[in-house]
Amino acid sequence: MKHDPARTARRALLGLVLLVSLAVAWSLLRPAAPASAPTTPPPVPGTGTTVGEMEFLRFRDDSRRIEVKARKMVGQQGDAMLMRDVEAVLPFVSQGRPGTVTIRADECQYQPALERAAFKGHVQLRAEDGFELDTDSLKYWGDKERVFTRDPLRFKRGAISGTATGLEYRSGSGILLQDSVRMRIEDAAGPPTDVLSQSATASREERVITFSGAVLVRQGTRELKSERLRLDMSEGMDAVERAAATGNVDLLTGAGPVLPGSTARGGVSKRLRSQRLDVEFGAKGILRQALASDAASLEVEPGPLEAQERRRVTAPRLRFDFDEQGQLFAVHGLRGAGATARPGGAGRRAVLTAEPLGPTGGSARRVESDLFEATLHPATGAVKGAEFEGAIVFSEPGRKAWAGHSSYDQAAGTLVLTGDPRIVDEAEGSELRGRQIRIGTRTRAVSASGSVRHSIARKEAGARPGIFGGQEPTVFVCREFEFDGETRTARYRENALVRSGTDEVRAPLITLDDPGPSRRRMSATGGTTSVLHPRPAKGAAKEPAAVEARSREMLYEEAASRIVYTGDVEIRQGDILTRSPEATVMLTKDGGTLERLLAGEPVEVHQGVRRANGERGVYTPANETFVLTGEKVVLHDADRRLEGRILTFEVGSDRIRVDGREEERTEAVFRRKEPAKP
């Protein structure tokens, strides 16, 4: 048979209705008479019948339909009659239908004038609705409208049974079970439910049943502890409409079947703690909603096939929503009521944590937010999605993320951050910002869009900084960003820009591969522009001019400390411009600045009106000279032409050195012609 925990819990709570039946029985023993009604004389013994040594006596009070029978009259003390083997039949009304309660006892002391009766010895109370009560003594004080016993008692009605030490009933205040209350509900659909408490009360007028003092409810692997448990019943006292557990509430559920009806063991154990737990029931006792408040926390242990980590949710209030079948489908983390509703304070935020179990359990993770809502698959309890709202903080060792809003989709395996989101990876030394950031929960992929800014700091001291060096972090800016966690490849699209200090590279697409320390490769495609600032030589009077480069593609290799430009390469420093199919920038040993630039083959050099062609060119930023070489280097300058094998240009200088083909080195010096002054 399919086990319905909601129905079982309902039956456990409904077991308390039996107490109300007793309350109704005693409340009708002495109904209030109209003020003008004459005083009814006390009942008198009827005619007795003697059979051998046994004597049968009957007492009736027709105005109250009360009948007391005894086998023997022992004697009389004042107005009190002492009887043995007593049976008293009393009227009561249950759910609008009249009935009777029968009390049997070994002895009875009956005072008709005060309407008091004291039953003693094997006291049994039986009601027509099936309720049974057994105890050693029971006293009825009609003048006080009170029924009580101080002795241990047992009660039963159908599948419900229980014990207590002491019972007290007063008209208008209901029944009180005074000590060591224990109740059991036998349910064929599942294990029995046991309820224990120090005391319990029931009031039909208020339709309320309350357990107080060290309340403990057990059913199979489920256990609820609290200081107090209140049940609000339906009008017919046949169903629980609401339940409230208060004071150090601790609800523990053990692992169960993977799916309802499954014989395979699985699932997880859960522990819910709070200072108050309110539960609302719908038709047929099906759970509709539960609200844990005042420092609520839910702790979930891993299943055998899950990651070995303990998950915990804390919030000022946790709300659980159930579907029409009583299956949990949503969990909400809410702000507290009143003063605790203000966001940002300690203990006023929802916090989700995952803590590894064992040495290989992984790393701890944590999510904080003002509010959250998680949707679950009703049949399996698996998370389908979640929404986080308000000052969200995700954290794990070495990594943190912030956002104003976050949405998790289990089917798509994505976590989307919006509201000025940013991710900081302290281990990688990076920070990612954008209007929207998307994280692949299964693939480790990350993407961002809208005003993307990705900062990468220098990883380790003493490493070659290169483009990613300097004291300031390297910054990537673009509109669209993608990161593949498996290949450790980042792509920056649409107006991409990377800046390191004063150096920068621009391109429609910039790709960064990071296979390991000091092995990064950065490529730019679709038409690139870069600006590099060489360091001045020691003792130099001025800063060298910036080196500006344009090409179709660019590749930076951190391990080789070089930058390779390909496709219609143009490089300019100061007044010198070179054009070539390919050019390579070699960095210094520490990777911090340009050491030389190699261009060719072929290469064309422009300086003002001068133009030179050669096979290869070498530029040295330290002394700002460009040397053009080849079998035939040709220089065109205004109205003259000169050929040689080596041609040397100096940035910002009119001097040019040309080495001829002869063994003996020659040098020609040309000065620029100044344009005619008007």
Image (cartoon, rainbow, N blue to C red):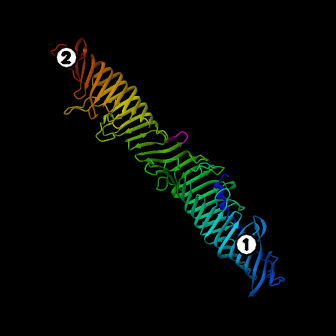
Q: Which residues are magenta?
A: 410-416
- Mark 2 highlights which residue? 659
Amino acid of disc 2: Asp
Residue 349 lies in magenta, yes or no? Answer: no
Task: Establish if 197 lies above or below 354.
Answer: below
Q: How many marks?
A: 2
**Residue placed most toward the observer, 413 or 8:** 8
Pointer 1 local density, CA inside 10 Å: few below 14, some 14–19, many at least 20: many
The structure residue drawn at horizontal position 16% and vertical position 14%, both measured from the top left corner, is 663
Image coordinates of residue 532 in percent, x first then y, are 31, 30
Task: Establish if 272 lies above or below 590.
Answer: below
Q: Nearer the viewer, mark 2 or mark 1?
A: 1
Can you tell which quarter of the image residue 196 is in? bottom right
Residue 413 lies in magenta, yes or no? Answer: yes
Q: Earlier in the sequence, mark 2 or mark 1?
A: 1
**Residue placed most toward the observer, 339 or 122:** 122
- Mark 1 highlights which residue? 125
Secondary structure, mark 1, is strand
Can you tell which quarter of the image residue 282 is in? bottom right
Can residue 155 be seen here? The reply is yes
Amino acid of disc 1: Leu
Can residue 173 be seen here? The reply is no
Can you tell which quarter of the image residue 628 is in? top left
C-alpha distance separating marks 2 and 1: 128 Å
The structure residue drawn at horizontal position 29% and vertical position 18%, both measured from the top left corner, is 604
What mark, if any, has residue 52 been given in the picture? none
Task: Establish if 167 lies above or below 82.
Answer: above
